[in-house]
Image: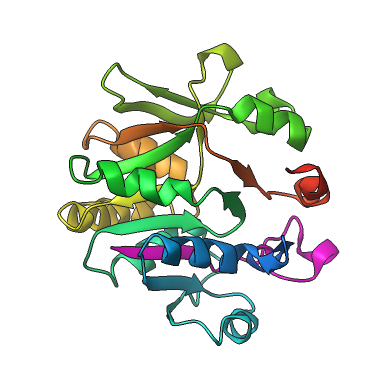
């Protein structure tokens, strides 16, 4: 199983205040990127692939002691994370766990995914305690959160739209995904078609566009998760336990 990390962007909303890539923010004496890699290694995932772009040499310097493969997104200024996802996946040919690089999450997620990946070909972990995280982030749920719904079989039925009532949201997309080797070519095909019309778009929008074409399994989890989206999230790191 491979790990694909998306770390090509400049993080415009926060860069001027922290003066480094979000993936290099320190948490418990290590960078976010290094924590994810270390946690995955503990779960016997040793094939690490990182899509880089902005400040790529800084990332390479920080990770020089680690055995990782780099995939370069030379268009990081004019594209979004979805294009990095496409570049990363088209260079891989095995079962793959994908992760954003500006998130902090429990290493148990890797175990939970591997446990059910024998029967599920596309998996997205769903944080069932997302409202507690929003309290720490001090964010307005109606402004910052997206819809997420699934049916009785935990198949994704909606994601990425603006919410009207938080009670109808069944969880938080965590920026993590699993795609089996079997489904990889199909996902790459759909990504290529989607990007032709949506050069700058979000992963959740793409997932919403393919939810009726593929079975995307929502894996509910109560394990720890946190996202650094802006400077407020960064300053709130001290409140994490």
Where residue 158 sits in the image (x, y, percent)?
A: 39, 26
Q: Which residues are magenta?
A: 1-22
Q: Is residue 10 magenta?
A: yes
> Which residue is painted at 29% across and 72% down in the image?
91
Q: Is residue 43 left or right of residue 130?
A: left
> Which residue is painted at 36% across and 62% down in the image?
86
In the image, residue 189 above or below residue 137: below
Q: How is the image coloured?
A: rainbow
In the image, residue 125 above or below residue 145: below
> Which residue is painted at 44% across and 63% down in the image?
42
> Which residue is painted at 48% across and 21% down in the image?
170
Q: Is residue 240 magenta?
A: no
- For the C terminus, the image quarter is top right
* Residue 63, quarter of picture: bottom right
Please tell me which residue lies in front, 152 or 78. 152
Q: Residue furthest front?
A: 42
Where residue 203 sits in the image (x, y, percent)?
A: 45, 47
Where residue 236 sits in the image (x, y, percent)?
A: 80, 45
Where residue 181 sits in the image (x, y, percent)?
A: 19, 58
Q: Is residue 179 visible?
A: yes
Please tell me which residue lies in front, 146 or 177. 177
Q: Is residue 38 left or right of residue 124?
A: right
- For the N terminus, the image quarter is bottom left
Please tell me which residue lies in front, 213 or 223. 223
Q: How many marks?
A: 0
Q: Is residue 165 visible?
A: no
* Residue 141, quarter of picture: top right
């Amino acid at each position: 199983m491979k790990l694909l990390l998306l770390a090509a962007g400049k993080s415009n909303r926060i860069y001027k205040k922290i003066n480094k890539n979000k993936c290099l923010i320190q948490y418990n004496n290590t960078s976010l990127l290094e924590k994810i890699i270390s946690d995955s290694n503990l779960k016997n995932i040793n094939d690490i692939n990182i899509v880089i772009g902005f400040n790529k040499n800084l990332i390479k310097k920080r990770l020089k002691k680690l055995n990782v493969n780099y995939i370069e997104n030379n268009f990081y200024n004019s594209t979004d994370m979805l294009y990095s996802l496409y570049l990363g996946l088209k260079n891989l040919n095995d079962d793959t766990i994908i992760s954003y690089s500006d998130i902090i999450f429990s290493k148990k997620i890797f175990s939970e995914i591997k446990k059910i990946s024998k029967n599920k070909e596309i998996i997205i972990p769903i944080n069932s305690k997302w409202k507690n995280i929003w309290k720490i982030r001090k964010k307005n749920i109606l402004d910052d959160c997206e819809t997420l719904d699934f049916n009785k079989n935990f198949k994704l039925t909606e994601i990425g739209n603006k919410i009207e009532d938080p009670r109808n949201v069944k969880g938080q997309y965590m920026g993590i995904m699993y795609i089996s080797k079997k489904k990889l070519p199909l996902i790459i095909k759909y990504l290529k078609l989607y990007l032709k019309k949506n050069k700058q778009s979000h992963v959740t929008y793409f997932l919403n566009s393919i939810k009726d074409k593929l079975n995307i399994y929502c894996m509910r989890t109560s394990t720890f998760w946190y996202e650094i989206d802006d400077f407020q999230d960064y300053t709130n790191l001290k409140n994490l336990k």
